[in-house]
Amino acid sequence: MRGKSDEQNGMKMKAGIAPHSQACIDSHVHVDLYDEQERDKLLENAFSEGVAAVVAVSMHLQSAVLNREIAGRYPGKVYPAYGFHPEQPIPSEEEIMRLFDWIRERYEAGEQFAIGEVGLPYYTRTEAEEAKESQDGHLFDERPYLALLERFAALAAELDLPIILHAVYEDAAKACDILEKYNVRKAHFHWFKGSAEVVRRMAARGYMVSVTPDVAYEEEIRHLVMQYPLEQLMVETDGPWPFEGPYAGQPTRPAMAADAAKHIAQIKKLPESKVAEQLLANTRRFYGIE
C-alpha cells in the first residue's frame, strides 16, 4: 500500500515530472484563461511543486487588468505582462489607446511588468489566405497588425521593458525587422518555430526563446534546442494550451515547464541540474525576477 507521499510522487511521475525536480519559471502562461475557480489552486500547486514564478501574459486590456490583480495576490511569484494577442481581430483605435494609456500608468506607478503577448497573426493569416476569405473579398490584411506591433515595440524600447512575441515562421523575420528598427534590447519569442537563417539572426541579437513540453515529441522544436544557445533559452507551458505525446489528456500546469528543461538537457547532452539552473538564471535575469 502506498503512503501519501508515494502517491503524490507517482502522480508527478505520471505527468512526466520527477519528484523534487529542479526549480523553474514558467515564462509564458495564460493564468487568466484558466477557470476562475482553478486559478489559485493552479498557482499554489505550482509553487509547491518547485515552480519559482510564472510570467502571466495578457490577451487584451481586460485580460491585463485581471493579470495585474492576480499578480498582486502573489508578489514575487506572478510576473504580469500586458499586451494584445495578435490571433484576434484588430482592436479599434480607442481600445488601443486605452490599453497603451493603462500600461503607461502602470509604468509611472513603478510597477514591474513586461509587454506581451504581442506579435503577428500567423495562424489567422494563413488560414484566411488558404480559404481566400475575408470580409472585404480580399486576402487577409496584415498591415494593421504590423503597425500595432511597431507601436508595442516602440513602447518597449521607450520604457526599456521586455517584450514577449508571438511571431513564428516567416513572421519572425518581420518581427525582427521591427525590433531592430526600434532597437528593442529585451525580446522573448515564445513557442518559436522558424528558419535556420532567422534563428541565427535572433541568437546574434541576444533574443530569448522559450520551449514548451512539446520538445518531448516535436522534432522541429528539438532541432531548435540543438541550434540555440543555452544561455538564451527559457521554458514555458503556454497553459492552458494542451499537449500531445506523453501529456495527452492531461491538463497543462506550470510544473510541466520543468519537464521541458529535462528534455533540453538530454538534447544538449548536459547534466539536468546544470541546465535547470541555467534556464532559471536566464529567466530571472531577463525579467528581473528576484
Image (cartoon, rainbow, N blue to C red):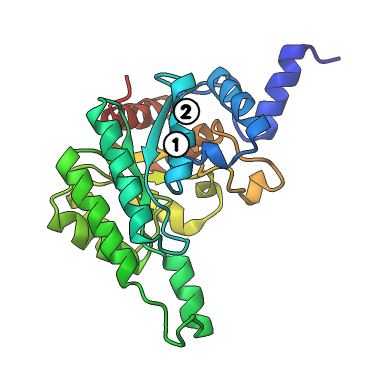
Circle 1 — which element?
helix
Distance from label 1 to label 2 (Cα)? 6 Å
| 140 sits to left or right of 254 | left
Quadrant housing the N terminus: top right
Q: Residue at x 73, y 16 (%)?
A: 6
Amino acid type indicated by mark 2: Glu
The label shown at residue 65 is: 1
Mark 1: few, some, or many residues within 10 Å (few <14, many ≥20)?
some
Mark 1 belongs to which amino acid?
Val
Rendered location of residue 235, percent (x, y): 43, 38
- Write the residue at 27% across / 28% down: 285
State the image quarter where residue 52 is shown.
Answer: top left
* Circle number at residue 9: none
Please give the residue where the numbered disc 2 appears in the rendered image.
69
Which residue is at the front of the view, 243 or 142?
A: 142
In this view of the protein, can residue 25 be seen by the observer?
no
Could you say where residue 62 lies in the image, as x and y percent from the top left? 47, 43
Q: Is residue 37 left or right of residue 227?
A: right
* Residue 6 relative to residue 16: left or right: right
For image coordinates 15% across by 56% down, the residue present is 180
Q: Is residue 256 above or below residue 157?
A: above
Foreground residue among 279 and 272: 279
Q: Nearer the viewer, residue 55 or 218?
A: 55
The answer to whether mark 1 and mark 2 are in CB contact below 8 A is yes
Position of the C terminus, as image quadrant, is top left
